[in-house]
Amino acid sequence: MNNIHLEITGVNMDFPTPNGPFRALEDVNLKVLKGEFVSIIGHSGCGKSTVLNIVAGLYQATAGGVILNGKEVIGPGPERAMVFQNHSLLPWLTAYENVELAVKTIFKGKKSKAEMKDWIEHNMKLVHMDHALHKRPDEISGGMKQRVGIARALAMEPEVLLLDEPFGALDALTRAHLQDSVMEIQADLGNTMMMVTHDVDEAVLLSDRIVMMTNGPAACVGETLHVDMPKPRDRIAVSEGKEYNNCRHEVLRFLYERHGKKVEVLETKEEGQKNDVVNFKQSKQINNKVA
Ligand SMILES: Nc1ncnc2c1ncn2[C@@H]1O[C@H](COP(=O)(O)OP(=O)(O)O)[C@@H](O)[C@H]1O
Ligand SMILES: [Mg+2]
């Protein structure tokens, strides 16, 4: 028995459109270990958010499915919390009250009022927001709002944290601080994390494994890459290391040289590109073993 926490198997996703169904994903397969940090990277529109939404239970896959702890995901659940790119806080509530709303939903009848207060404050502290508990979203910066969004997700005590480009809208310095916070939190709590990003450095710095998706339509997992760097990771120290730069290079190569557009490649008759089909199939087999 291994410690597979989450398993995505044979997932297809067809979206209905006026011109008929649009196949966004085809045969997406991925196994995520307990406590693993997996990043999903790929070109804009390839289907990263769709994968995350299926894991969250917000979308139902057209075929295949997701197993969490041996049970099929059939809808949203508190064991899977999501953090979106745009904080999605309620503007009329303070930071504290935004987190409280989630805490009340999950822990009603299980925690006393005082315990809930402690729990909210504890989670705000984890994201370094304990100094601004009673500020409303329009009184705090973008980075702070994202911190509250992360605190809200953590306060649900999720086994799996799903992050959809959580730092995409932030300036570089704020993004770096939040990445450090997420690394700290994962070291403390050991959650399984799946993060969508299009930032190569972010993926390498944070991940145990990087999942590279082919371009859509009918996107799938093109390659996966293990990032073999000990944790905790210091961004300056690792950025000078060989493994960091090798991983970075591998991801960039995938993104820029071989978009791995499955449909196009498989339909191409030219000799040179037939090799791509072989390579693609081989990489798929490797993935199935690794993933
Ligand atoms: N609700 C929807 N209806 C129709 N098409 C959708 C819907 N959601 C996503 N898509 C399409 O599916 C593809 C993947 O989208 P998405 O998962 O948002 O990509 P990414 O997050 O990688 O940028 C895109 O072509 C997008 O236009
Ligand atoms: Mg997206």
Image (cartoon, rainbow, N blue to C red):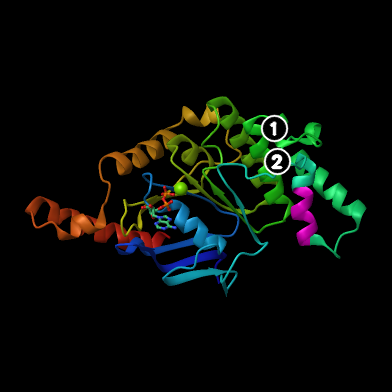
Which residue is found at the position 82% from the left and 49% from the top? Answer: 119
Circle nearer the N terminus (2, 1): 2
Q: Which residue lies under the disc numbered 2? A: 91
Which residue is found at the position 13% from the left and 56% from the top? Answer: 268
Amino acid carrying mark 1 in the image: Asp
Tell me which secondary structure the magenta stretch mostly adopts: helix
Label 2 – label 1 distance at C-alpha: 7 Å
Question: In this view, which residue lies farthest toward the front?
Answer: 18
Which residue is found at the position 51% from the left and 32% from the top? Answer: 238
Which residue is found at the position 25% from the left and 57% from the top? Answer: 262
Residue 176 placement: quadrant: top right
Q: Residues within 10 Å of mark 2 (few under 14, many from 20)?
A: few
Expressed as whole percent of the image width and height from the top left, the position of residue 230 reads 55, 41
Judge whether 123 appears above or below 271 on screen.
above
Nearer to us in this view, 2 or 259: 259
Quarter occupied by the C terminus = bottom left
Expressed as whole percent of the image width and height from the top left, the position of residue 188 reads 70, 46
Mark 1: secondary structure = helix
Looking at the rendering, the stretch of residues picked out in magenta corresponds to: 99-106
Magenta span contains residue 103 = yes
Any mark on residue 138, and which?
1
Q: Do labels 2 and 1 touch, CB within 8 Å?
A: yes
Expressed as whole percent of the image width and height from the top left, the position of residue 74 reads 56, 72
